[in-house]
Amino acid sequence: MVDLNKKVFIFDLDGTLTESKSALQKDMADVLCRLLEKENTVTIISGGGFKQFEKQFLSNFNCSYKNLSRLYLLPTSGSQFYSWDEARNAFPAPSSLPLTYE
């Protein structure tokens, strides 16, 4: 059975959560942490690469590690997918699957 009380929030990074190419502000980081603390899923997408996420978002996002398992990052316009790895306490690089004609 599906729990209809769970919620998913999807945000664009540049121009929505932050000014374009600017660091995440503390008040916005606090709002996102509160969403995660309430067991919501938060997904953030951006046209920039993961290094831009690290600089602009993760360096200013100080949420408890226990809540990061519900945070998903989609850099490069969603062509990559990063999820929290509790064993590493990091967002490890996604495994790549080569595209073939088969």
Image: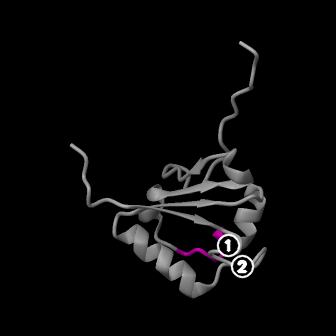
Using residue 27 as the reference point, say whether residue 69 is left or right of it.
left
Q: Give 17 or 85, whichever is nearer the viewer.
A: 17
Label 1, secondary structure: give it. helix
Tag 2: amino acid: Ala
Tag 1: amino acid: Ser
List the residue tagged with mark 2.
23
Query: Label 1 crowding class (10 Å Cα cut-off): few <14, some 14-19, many 20+?
Result: few
- Image height of 72 relative to 22, above or below: above
Q: Closer to us: mark 1 or mark 2?
A: 2
Q: Which residues are magenta?
A: 57-62
Quadrant position of the C terminus in the picture: top right
Using residue 88 as the reference point, say whether residue 93 is left or right of it.
right
Residue at coordinates 71% horizontally, 71% vertically from top-left?
Answer: 14
Label 2, secondary structure: give it. loop
Residue 70: x, y in percent? 45, 57
Residue 28: x, y in percent? 56, 81
Using residue 26 as the reference point, say whether residue 70 is left or right of it.
left
Mark 1 in CB contact with mark 2 (< 8 angstroms)? yes
Residue 12: x, y in percent? 63, 65
For marks 1 and 2, the one nearer the N-term is 2
Quadrant position of the N terminus in the picture: top left
